[in-house]
Amino acid sequence: MWEKLADLEARYEELGERLSQPEVLADPAQLRELSKARAEIEEVVSRYRELRSIRDQVSETEALLHGEHDSEMRELAHQELERLHGEAQRLEQELEIALLPKDPNEDKAVIVEIRSGTGGEEAALFAAELYRMYTRYAERRGWKWERINISESELGGVKEAVFSINAQGAYRLMKHESGVHRVQRVPETESSGRIHTSAATVAVLPEAEEIEVKIDPSELEIQTFRASSAGGQHVQKNETAVRIIHLPTKTVVICQDERSQRQNRDKAMRVLRAHLFEQMRSQQETEQRGARRRQIGTGDRSEKIRTYNFPQDRLTDHRIGRNWHNLPSILDGAIEPILEGLVEAEHAALLAEMASEG
């Protein structure tokens, strides 16, 4: 670790020198590129320097302790050493995490898809609650989110909800949400008071730029139709809704929320790009068998990752074996501790894997 940190500091100093050169200052593109590269490592270098300073203070305090005969001063030196060791340990842990292999997609915006699963109308109602939970979470963080497509059920639930969150770091925090979310509770429609188990699936996809995924227009089948309401009745006279089929992969995306066909087509293409990008990414991971997995669990959408148990007011994440309580607050978007807990588990798994490799 220390060798890597020393190399980063040297790189940081080199970039600083280059940024002061006249030829770089006269080239906006090069100036922007070098400034970005320096900014990316600035925090790590700052923590490294702080850790070095603390270790110097530890050496000085230990020397003072050995040469001090006054009991009161020795006690103060012991207390200071304890504080310094605690600070050094904290910084070392932070630097270990900062040096972990970075997911190249972690700063991307995301497209989230929620679909009702087993459980009929109750599953659709639960899917609607998950949709609200994530959008409320985005609002709490001040993230910009945009509805892409909603297909509602008869009783106000959601058969399918697709939306985007455009914020730096959205994928880093939300990537572990993909999978099956299960709910256990007494449905409002249940007269006998029996607890039912229903499910909804969530997929979190990093949003891809056009330059990252090239789509051949000849490989697309684009269909238009009239947008419909929850009951299936057509609510617009014109064919504004769009269905795009990517023929090579048989991927189908639908968007009917907007009032114009062009807007629906643009949104559907965003979703299609995200799907194709995810397929490319998954294929690369499969081909590189030795690559570290960056998701807790399998990352498979069919994996049961979480249970929301209403009778016991408990959320359980089965991948890391942790529980949280206060489901009303969680479903109102207070999911930060859960998402951070999953990121911490990912870091711990990567650190353990790196330690086992030597």
Image (spheres, rainbow, N blue to C red):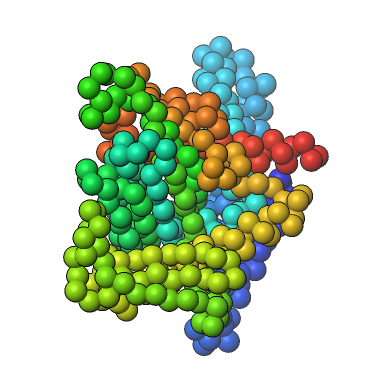
* Quadrant housing residue 250: bottom right
Residue 102 can be seen, yes or no: yes
Residue 325 can be seen, yes or no: no
Query: 297 or 191, which lies in front?
Result: 191
Q: Residue at x 56, y 36 (%)?
A: 345
State which quarter of the image contains the N terminus: top right
- As displayed, is residue 119 above or below residue 142? above
* Quadrant housing residue 192: top left
Q: Residue at x 34, y 75 (%)?
A: 224
Residue 108 image position (x, y, % from top left): 48, 61
What is the residue that sits farthest to the top in this orientation? Answer: 71
Left or right: 336 with respect to 220? left
Residue 261 image position (x, y, % from top left): 30, 77
Left or right: 95 with respect to 233? right
- As displayed, is residue 159 above or below residue 280? above
* Quadrant housing residue 298: top right
State which quarter of the image contains the C terminus: top right
Q: Residue at x 55, y 39 (%)?
A: 303
Residue 226 image position (x, y, % from top left): 27, 70
Residue 26 image position (x, y, % from top left): 52, 87
What is the residue that sits farthest to the right in this orientation? Answer: 358
- As displayed, is residue 173 above or below residue 35? above
Left or right: 84 with respect to 123? right
